[in-house]
Image (cartoon, helix red, strand yellow):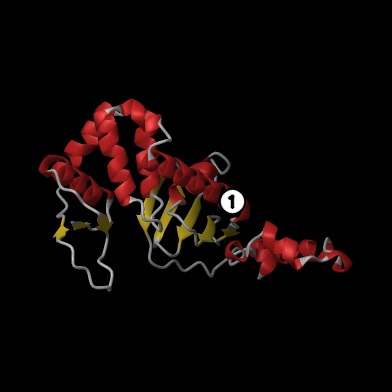
Amino acid sequence: MILVYDGTFEGFLSLIYEVYYKKLKPIKIYKTLPNKIIFDEIKTIETSLDNAIKVLSAIKAKFPKDIVCRILNIFMCDTKEFELDLLEYIIVGFNDTKQLFNINIQSVFYLNTLEKELFKNVHKITGFIRFKELEDGTLYAKVESKFNIVYFLGKHFLKRFNNQNFIIHDLNRKLAFVKIDETFSIQEIAYFNETNYSCDEQKFQKLWKIFFSGVTLKERINTNLQRQMVPLIYRTYMNEFL
């Protein structure tokens, strides 16, 4: 049986409810069906907020707090196929929470590895992200990341820009972490017009490029090493490479 859900966290919790209580045996889980011909039985899971709340409440009551956080973290790895492993992981936990620390179980090992990959990606982006100051003093940064990490990036910079308004905009997912005064939130932002930079920002961009060029020794340029240390995927919005 192949299960299809809407890609939301509530939709996935609804899927867990259906599988657990109706004893379904899925072999694949999709957000959208692939174009290739599929001969297996297909069942579309409708999102039910009531069922989702029941499953989430059961997870919070049964699982340790760090495991609940891991489940949420894994769902941020939205470019990976994790659903079948996460489903197995949660069912294993309902049967015996101690087994969630047994890396000999394939789903446990895979999700542990995937979570490490997630935070490795977060760590890299925090080093390569570039903010620009807008006219009103707000700092704005664009990112295009492998995973859905704007929340983690926002929490990281809250500690560093606690008195500064800032926006971190994931262009691919049309999501942004917005911090204004004492409040912050994740918002859907399809497009953001940030062309009006402050006068200081334009000066700093020029100074940064001059500095980057000044410390470069042309005789020692090693483009292969440079690409290894700063992969092309991270350079799109780095001032020194524009």
The local crowd at label 1, few if under 14, some if 14 to 19, many if 20 or more residues have their Cα within 10 Å, is few
Q: Which residue is mark 1?
A: 124
Relative to 233, say whether 12 is above or below: above
Q: Nearer the viewer, residue 39 or 79?
A: 39
Query: In the image, 141: left or right of 28?
Result: right
What x and y, as percent, mark residue 215? Answer: 83, 60
What x and y, as percent, mark residue 86? Answer: 32, 44
Relative to 42, say whether 71 is above or below: above
Please, which residue is most extreme toward the right here?
Answer: 219
What x and y, as percent, mark residue 15? Answer: 19, 48
- Identify the secondary structure beneath mark 1: helix
Query: In the image, 203: left or right of 233?
Result: right
Please, which residue is most extreme toward the left here?
Answer: 22
Query: In the image, 138: left or right of 18?
Result: right
Q: Nearer the viewer, residue 120 or 136?
A: 120
Whether residue 6 is visible, yes or no, is yes
Q: Nearer the viewer, residue 98 or 151?
A: 98
Total numbered labels placed on residues in the image: 1
Whether residue 64 is visible, yes or no, is no
Q: Nearer the viewer, residue 139 or 48?
A: 48
What x and y, as percent, mark residue 57? Answer: 22, 33
**What residue sits 28% from the left and 38% below the top?**
90
**What residue sits 18% from the left and 67% below the top?**
39
> Mark 1: which amino acid?
Lys
**What residue sits 15% from the left and 47% below the top?**
24
**What residue sits 54% from the left and 45% below the top?**
157
Query: In the image, 46: left or right of 91?
Result: left
Q: Quadrant of the N terminus?
A: bottom left
Q: Quadrant of the C terminus?
A: bottom right
Residue 110: name its quadrant.
top left
